[in-house]
Image (cartoon, rainbow, N blue to C red):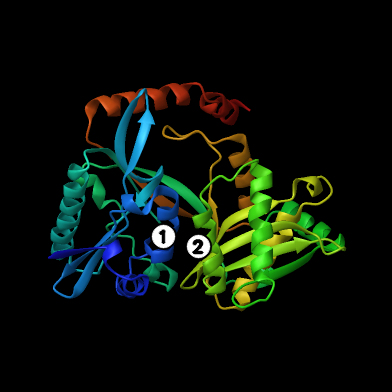
Amino acid sequence: MKVVRFKEMSNSEWDAYLGKIRESTYLHASWYINYLNAINGKENCQSFILFDGNDPIAICPLSIFKVENFGEEYVEATFKGFPSIYPAVVRLTATQRRRTIRKVFAQIDAILKTYAVKRIEFYKHPMNLDVINGDFEIFNTAEAVSYGYFCDIKNSVIIDLKREEERLMHEMSQYQRKRIKKSKNQGLVIREYKGEDKDADNIFDDFRLSHVKSAGRLTRPIESWDIMKSLLKENKASLFTASIENGKNISYLYCGEFDRLSFGWSQVNIDEYETQYSPRHLLEWEAMMSYKKRGFLYYELGVKQDSPQFNYIPTEKEKSITQVKERYGGELYSWLHFEKFFDKDLFNKIYAHRLEKFLNSNYFLSQNEHIYG
């Protein structure tokens, strides 16, 4: 067995190996690792591929991040708070799989020990290459539990683009259909930019500046935006806009692409037009229909965050966004979230903090309304 680090090979080499490991998702792709590295710093990237001879057997995006929390500084294995990515492993027999995954976690543990990591998180995305292309086998999903990891679930709303357009329209909520119809009647025009479109650069810059204006600041490094722009030029992403009669763009939706999965990555509205228009409803619908025509099989709207959970309390904005996602219909696919601690004191502090936040949330009030309302 040998380990080759992400920084020791080219992006094209990395992605060629990724294609041989059918458990891989877009989170394992070089461009997504580069995006996360732009936020967390390339020097903190510990991503690697495990080889048996010349054959790749596991791919693991991994990073470390120095945290200041509870009045102390410590190291965790995340991309600046975004979890590392669960290892993707080649298809093996059951006993070979168990031997291999032990070696993968042993390699991860060796890296974590080197940097005195006290906590690690993993995300496991449901839409790997096999699933996208029709193989829905669900074994080995939570094998990390045997290696000391806690597991919880986040649901993501995903649209099956193989269904007929009429059925997809019928499956969404009546409210959503009305909003889409209203936007069409208001004359909103949807456009798509990608590849060598001559206006793509300028439109992307407007999209980025709209984010800055909406947030009141630049929320992440400019390098991460540059990576998104390069993906647009390389036909690995598309940018959709909604404009009014005078040609003014009032809403932007940036979508990522992986194999035949597309996903809503980043969206922003121009604030001053939100009262009169509700552009996102039509914008995302037309993006889905564009991907359907292009032969994509799925469109991911994103994680559903609407109820307090022990490890995360959604904000009101996140709840509102979740409502928009749900109204498109779609099915719920589960992101698995894994977490492991290497320090008892840190575990105690984090879980005490989570418990306090959970008890102060509206969880029990909402349950009472559910039972007695």
Q: In the structure shown, which secondary structural element does the residue marked by tag 2 occupy? A: helix
Give the residue drawn at x 38%, y 65%. Answer: 30
Quarter holding the N terminus? bottom left
Q: Are marks 2 and 1 in contact (CB under 8 Å)?
A: yes
Q: In the structure shown, which secondary structural element does the residue marked by tag 1 occupy? A: helix
- Residue 171 placement (x, y as % from top left): 65, 60
Report how far apart the C-alphas of labels 2 and 1 lie in the structure: 8 Å
Q: Is residue 351 above or below residue 248?
A: above
Left or right: 300 as drawn, with respect to 76: right
Q: Nearer the viewer, residue 277 or 165?
A: 277
- Numbered marks: total: 2
- Residue 318 placement (x, y as % from top left): 59, 41
First in sequence: mark 2 vs mark 1: 1
- Residue 336 placement (x, y as % from top left): 38, 49
**Residue type, mark 1 in image:** Asn
Residue 227, label in figure: 2
Left or right: 149 as drawn, with respect to 305: left
Crowding at label 2, few (<14), some or many (≥20) Cα neighbours within 10 Å? some
Residue at label 1? 34
Q: Is residue 226 above or below residue 366?
A: below
Q: Is residue 212 above or below residue 182?
A: above
